[in-house]
């Protein structure tokens, strides 16, 4: 009984074993015997890790591009893309500056000159960052125009405002890291303003800059904020945001 | 039935000077207790009845009806009654399917209620969770939502890839604290604030206005108490928000494209672009 295995045999061989079955839960579209029925569609959603994000069924009108413009989802995807490209960049970057040890800037030069795909990934990271600030703004506007902040979604709007603030802070802390003239002076314009905080102005500025003016300490401080602290906090607020979307009854509407 | 109270107990308690609320609660409890005792007393008699007149296997319909009637009388079924009812229903079902030999058509008994879980028949009506809410027009997440999300994700990735291949991120000369470029501009999302800096004291433009804006935005759901989400009912706030957004966008544009050296006004098509992303 020797014959050449056809595609079906291969499929069966791959799917019909304990390892495969242990990975994909019953109802997974990758498991043997998935049929395109209501039951299996429901199971496919329920037995997937995406069940953390999506319910089994969603309102039909929410699928229309003209309802969400996919702005929240795009913001989230950009955040993931930024994390991935950002991790790549971290392999080639040292947050060190100061006369005689301008490593950060040298790393930026090497990144485009010597690292394979270095400038591509850097470009991607930068453009995605600008785009994400934009999509988060637009997402906020879309939510506003749909009145989607009205009960029971008031609190999720506030979580959203925190997300907006965190997004801006991430963008701003990242702006300093190339340590070129653009970075230094764009950031000074911003931090100079913070120095005018009533009463605690000088202290606020000192804490933010790690000194009286932008220097190597600022770079280290903002690097840690940018690659660790702020993404961590953002992730937590994102979790609350998504959880509330579902608890508040899914996407709002139809209008 | 649930609201029945034991009047005697109630009067006694009121006479004792207990509050209306306490008296009502205790009287209600007493009524329920009495009812239970009564049922317990009646039960042996009732149980004997179906057992005595128990029809031969196959004739489940009638017995089921009887059980239902018993249930209606007493309001509750004992576990034994419930078991008996299940057994009879199962027997009846077996008889039917045996007769129709593999035919899938639902029996007349269950006609029109194919989607009801049959065990629900054993639960007293008060035990069924009542869900009020409109039936909504919904679709399955898989494949509908997931596939559109995938397309959106691919489109964004494609766009960004093209951009990243053809447009390089800027990298100017090494940072030099002693050499201030002219003009020095903030990143575009803070350009509105920088533009305000030209008209207001830095504390106002850099601290007061952003704080007021953030707090104001956060307060929107608590200030706007209009319950309607339809645009035609929200004209005022939509106009207000649009004015705010356009005002902000104009500030950002002006700061980005129309400010040159010394942050003086320039025309980008005459004097060139003083802007970096
Ligand atoms: C990092 C930034 C953010 C991400 C990744 C994000 C993500 C999302 C996603 C995926 C949704 C589902 C619906 C949709 O795609 O539109 C959503 C809904 C929502 N978002 Fe955001 N969001 C962010 C920022 C914000 C901001 C700035 C606000 C408002 C100030 C906000 C308020 C809301 C509200 C109220 C909903 C429910 C909308 C509805 O039910 O129609 N979010 N968000």
Image (tube, coloured by chain):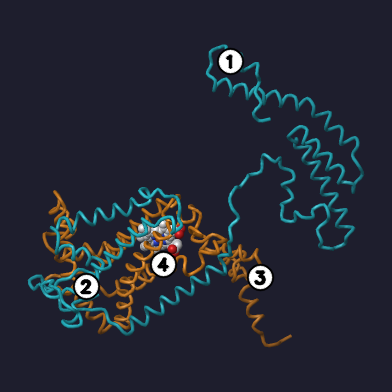
Q: Do the residues at discs 1 and 4 belong to one chain?
A: no
Residue lying at 34% horizontally and 56% vertically, measured from the top left: A161
| Residue marked by disc 2 | B256
Q: Nearer the viewer, mark 4 or mark 3?
A: 4
Badge 4: residue crowd in 10 Å (few <14, some 14–19, many ≥20)? many
- Indicate the chain on which mark 4 is placed: A
Task: State whether residue A239 appears in this view.
Answer: no
Q: Which chain is cyan?
A: B
The spot of residue A100 in percent (x, y) is 11, 74
2 and 4 marks in contact (CB < 8 Å): no
| Residue marked by disc 1 | B13
| Residue marked by disc 3 | A35
Tell me: A93 left or right of B73: left
| Residue marked by disc 4 | A71
Residue extending farthest to the top is B15
The spot of residue A79 in percent (x, y) is 37, 67
- Indicate the chain on which mark 1 is placed: B
Spatial separation of the CA atoms under disc 1 and disc 2 = 80 Å
Q: Nearer the viewer, residue B56 or B148?
A: B148
Badge 3: residue crowd in 10 Å (few <14, some 14–19, many ≥20)? few
Q: Nearer the viewer, residue A213 or A73?
A: A73
The spot of residue B17 in percent (x, y) is 53, 13
Q: Total marks drawn?
A: 4
Q: Do the residues at discs 2 and 4 belong to one chain?
A: no
Q: Secondary structure at mark 1?
A: helix
Q: Nearer the viewer, residue B198 or B13?
A: B198
Q: Secondary structure at mark 4?
A: helix
């Amino acid at each position: 009984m020797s014959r050449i295995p056809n595609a079906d045999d291969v499929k069966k061989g791959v799917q019909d074993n304990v390892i495969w079955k242990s990975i994909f839960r019953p109802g997974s579209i990758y498991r043997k015997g998935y049929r395109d029925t209501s039951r299996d569609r429901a199971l496919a959603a329920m037995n997937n890790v995406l069940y953390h994000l999506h319910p089994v069924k969603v309102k039909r009108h929410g699928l229309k591009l003209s309802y969400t413009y996919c702005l929240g989802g795009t913001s989230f995807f950009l955040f993931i893309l930024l994390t991935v490209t950002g991790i790549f960049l971290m392999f080639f970057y040292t947050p060190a500056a100061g006369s005689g040890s301008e490593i950060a800037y040298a790393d930026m030069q090497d990144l485009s000159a010597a690292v394979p795909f270095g400038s591509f990934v850097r470009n991607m990271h930068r453009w995605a960052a600008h785009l994400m600030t934009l999509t988060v703004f637009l997402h906020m506007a879309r939510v506003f125009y749909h009145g989607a902040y009205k009960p029971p979604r008031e609190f999720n709007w506030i979580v959203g405002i925190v997300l907006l603030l965190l997004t801006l802070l991430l963008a701003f802390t990242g702006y300093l890291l190339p340590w070129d003239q653009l970075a230094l002076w764009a950031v000074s314009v911003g931090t100079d303003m913070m120095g005018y905080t009533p009463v605690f102005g000088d202290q606020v500025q000192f804490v933010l800059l790690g000194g009286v003016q932008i220097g190597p300490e600022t770079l280290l401080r903002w690097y840690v904020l940018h690659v660790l602290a702020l993404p961590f906090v953002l992730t937590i607020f994102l979790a609350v945001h998504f959880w509330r979307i579902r608890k508040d009854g899914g996407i709002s509407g139809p209008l | 039935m649930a609201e029945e109270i034991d009047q005697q107990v109630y009067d006694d308690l009121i006479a004792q000077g207990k509050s209306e609320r306490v008296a009502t609660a205790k009287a209600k409890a007493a009524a329920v207790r009495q009812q239970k005792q009564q049922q317990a007393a009646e039960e042996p008699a009732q149980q004997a009845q179906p057992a005595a007149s128990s029809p031969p296997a196959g004739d489940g319909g009638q017995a089921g009806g009887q059980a239902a009637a018993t249930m209606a009388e007493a309001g509750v079924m004992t576990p034994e009654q419930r078991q008996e009812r299940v057994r009879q229903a199962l027997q009846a079902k077996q008889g039917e399917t045996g007769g129709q030999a593999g035919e899938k058509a639902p029996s007349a008994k269950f006609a029109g209620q194919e989607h009801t879980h049959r065990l629900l028949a054993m639960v007293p009506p008060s035990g069924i969770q009542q869900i009020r809410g409109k039936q909504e027009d919904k679709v399955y997440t898989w494949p509908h939502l997931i596939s559109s999300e995938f397309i959106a994700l691919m489109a964004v990735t494609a766009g960004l890839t093209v951009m990243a291949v053809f447009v390089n991120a800027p990298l100017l000369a090494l940072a030099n604290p002693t050499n201030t470029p002219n003009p020095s501009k903030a990143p575009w999302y803070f350009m509105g604030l920088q533009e305000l800096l030209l008209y207001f004291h830095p504390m106002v433009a850099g601290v007061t206005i952003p704080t007021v804006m953030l707090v104001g935005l956060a307060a929107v759901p608590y200030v706007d108490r209009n319950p309607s989400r339809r645009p035609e009912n929200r004209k005022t706030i939509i106009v207000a928000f649009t004015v705010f957004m356009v005002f902000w966008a104009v500030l950002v544009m002006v700061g980005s494209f129309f400010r040159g050296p010394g942050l003086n006004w320039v025309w980008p098509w005459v004097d060139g672009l003083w802007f970096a992303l």
